[in-house]
Image (cartoon, coloured by chain):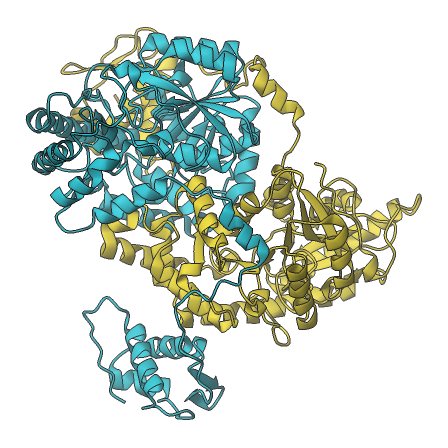
Chain colours: A cyan, B yellow
Amino acid sequence: MRVPLDRNNQTPLYRQIQDFLRSEIRSGALAPGTRLPASRAFAASLAVSRLTITDAYASLESEGLVCSRPGSGTYVAAAQPPVPAHQEPAADWPLWQQELLGHGWLPTQHELDQLAATSAHAGLISFAAGLGDSSLFPVKQFQRALHEVLSRDSRAALGYGDRAGYQPLRSTIAHILAIHGIQARPEQLLITSGAQQGLALIARLLLRPGDVVLVESPTYAGAIDLFRSLDVRLAGVPVDDEGMRMDLVEEALRIRQPRLIYTMPTFQNPTGTCLPLGRRRQLLALADRYNVPLVEDEFVGDLRYDGTAPPPLAALDPGGRVIYMGTFSKMLMPGLRMGYLLAAGPVYDRLLAYKRVDDLASSSLIQRALETYITIGRYQAHLQHACQLYRRRRDAMVAALRRHLPEDAHWRTPAGGLFIWLRLPRGLNSDALIPFATEEGVAFAPGALFFGGGRPQPYLRLNFAEHPPETIAEGIGRLGRAIARGLAQTAEPQMPHAGADAEEQSEEIRADGG
Amino acid sequence: MRVPLDRNNQTPLYRQIQDFLRSEIRSGALAPGTRLPASRAFAASLAVSRLTITDAYASLESEGLVCSRPGSGTYVAAAQPPVPAHQEPAADWPLWQQELLGHGWLPTQHELDQLAATSAHAGLISFAAGLGDSSLFPVKQFQRALHEVLSRDSRAALGYGDRAGYQPLRSTIAHILAIHGIQARPEQLLITSGAQQGLALIARLLLRPGDVVLVESPTYAGAIDLFRSLDVRLAGVPVDDEGMRMDLVEEALRIRQPRLIYTMPTFQNPTGTCLPLGRRRQLLALADRYNVPLVEDEFVGDLRYDGTAPPPLAALDPGGRVIYMGTFSKMLMPGLRMGYLLAAGPVYDRLLAYKRVDDLASSSLIQRALETYITIGRYQAHLQHACQLYRRRRDAMVAALRRHLPEDAHWRTPAGGLFIWLRLPRGLNSDALIPFATEEGVAFAPGALFFGGGRPQPYLRLNFAEHPPETIAEGIGRLGRAIARGLAQTAEPQMPHAGADAEEQSEEIRADGG
């Protein structure tokens, strides 16, 4: 039998053979009962390894197309299975499944994925992503680290390992945190499967359905989704140029009686604001007075381009008030799914217990490779490089916005992080802008996502870190044209819309499902 | 400056340098204000790379012991930080933390970890583990797969990837499931961070505090912990020689009105029983009649040593009744943290939504490497080898039990899986046996763990798959001596204890916390 093989094709050879034989069987060219060639001879005739033939035959057997008789060979099956229809069967789901259809919580973040998918279209420039520039990922070095770890630790790298996380990695993280003035001991650190899992563990431990969480408004869409999945209500505190407004925090603590405060004090997502030292102290004092745990999500605290950093809340914590969340995803490789929590006091053991019931432990291999890769020197060098690059890109975006956007569009120049939060000119919201932007070939994260979906918002979030300056200039040019077209189209009737002052972006987070 | 370096030591060179300098600074040998050698010259004099020195200095700086002045050099800090005490500060935790101390849920599985830790003691033979033999792990092949994936996919292997899991891996799993008669389409499969996460997602989606879950009694300790963490009550259905007793399932469905049935029909953990086809059909019919979702945890369904396998519940499912949980952890490498769910119908999208809020996605790199490593042929070859090996070990353990244990100890020979469930002779429970067993140098998983902790049980679980036959023979010999000593000691007074019939192991699972 001659099988046309394409050795330059991405499809493995065994699948090419499997596909060929399947179509021969389906077409009847290979009749039921036909004996297939012996694997050794067949492999030799095709110049492939015998394992390739064995794999192809085993796959066909799993499809029910052939059957092997020990000591005799492999035969085309007498009764062929029906060709799979690849369609959902007519809905005859059990009642409990049908009831789920009414129960409507689905994540807002899903929309961001769809935006990311459209950005794969040729020519579209997307500023919608939540990450930095993936070309900074040190793939080769990490590949070496993985290789080293498996050569050194062998099976030990593939067991469950320490449930709290690989001890040497926790030591390295403690050293990195010390740079930020945070005194952390390895036994206060818990490695999580990304920062998202860290927040999920905290929320499940400390919140019950109906509880209230205080968040910035707007805030991270993934946190909104998480809290909604737990039937937790959100109380949003508006953000001004200096982050969360402390006058409103106290009022919210008194009236809404939250069980948790979730905040990104440094280069907040999506607004990019940074809470100054005075407000940080106030926030800690308020949380203490009202006996509310503070969760500090320091997702891009390292990425500072101007000025000096106020200390993290965790560095100001007199003890056990703040649970600090860190991640390597934004800095290094999101696909590694590695983050960590820093928690002092009795809460630590309970978070560890929830980690156990959630997924037992995070990948030991990835933790060891990360530990091998990350030394303090390397971390700082990587950081320095990223900051230089992203500062230039931020400046490029600001310059392009000044050039291409109408005067009554409003933004602040963030001192760090990844995002510019843009308020559109009066009369336009970001949902209405999407069709024009798509036509012009540019994408962004619409503001509604960060308010929990629903009502269109006059805001949008732009990622300035992902693309080089020339792409940024081109993309913002397109955005400018899209805005001009949007304004022309929607000149009348005027959309209802928040006022021009930054203080007025006090939309309430919707917590009742999209 | 001369630094004693040990290049054969596991401690990285930069840490050796850091440790040396720290002790010199702490001792006063390097006085405050002293300028440390320039990194280039120092590196040359020690014959290390300059990065090594930079790392050592940066680490010391993060400890507050030195400070660098740009353009000038690195100096011993003027004010030295206090030596860290490495003790918990006097408890002055905020009130919300102190309240956690009263709120007592902590996982039972923690005890299994401690048992695993003691098994690392020289000479102790432990049958307590939940896994197979780690020496079967194909470390070298997996190392090659990782290398191939990073060379082929580069950064794409390190992004978030498809939130439901890497599509080609889902196709491979669909092929593997077809071997077991399960018709699965890749879009019905959801990759999870181990099977534990799969169960956690199901539980969080379908259960609310106070709901009842029907489980086998005894059952997997990690499931008991998970359900407790959600304030869910357990209704345990006793297991006889053929698994869950169907007469009692119907009664429990009527009276306890569970919202979920969680079952391991094939080689149940810990009893090793296998539900026959008739009972499987009954269970499906009952679940359908009472409109209760069925979760089938097929954690070792592949590891069969005798007879033929009844089809999984998922293969008998007319559509959307069963959520099937699989894992690679037991077969391959637990530290990879890879499992999967198979779910048809509206429940799939909701499980995916919970996956997203839980940890966004599972590691893309590990999924790709697994896909590269696992072909059907390889999977079947690995499985065949494991089955041959484990069958011999099971037989060795059964022979040793017959030789060394008193006549009124009771066990069944399981047809597959990893465990033998042993009932101790009348008058002895497994908690009382532990001190004698430890003295004799043998460990096991005490039965109470699988009933939710608390009351001592006359049962214990033995893992027969982890050790070679000669180790098994020696370990069971020790167990026999420990039992003899335990019986002599506790001859009077007699412990209250279930009768001799297998049907009588109807202890109720405790669901109210340990």
Locate residue A350 relative to residue A387 in the image: left or right.
right
The extreme right residue here reads B492
Residue drawn 33% across the image and 77% down it: A18
Which quarter of the figure is the N terminus of chain B placed in? Answer: top left
Is residue A62 placed above or below B442 in the rendered structure? below
- Name which quarter of the figure residue A50 lies in: bottom left
The image position of residue A221, as x and y in percent, is: 36, 34
Say which of A120 and B26 sits in front: A120
Locate residue B64 relative to residue A475 in the image: left or right.
right
Say which of B4 and A433 sits in front: A433
Which quarter of the figure is the C terminus of chain B placed in? Answer: top right
Locate residue A449 relative to residue B237 in the image: left or right.
left
Note whether residue B376 is visible.
yes
Residue drawn 39% across the image and 42% down it: B360
The image position of residue B181, as x and y in percent, is: 52, 72
The extreme front residue here reads A493
The image position of residue B389, as x and y in percent, is: 56, 68
Say which of A228 and A76 sits in front: A228
Residue drawn 70% across the image and 48% down it: B450
Is residue A296 placed above or below A97 in the rendered structure? above
Image label count: 0
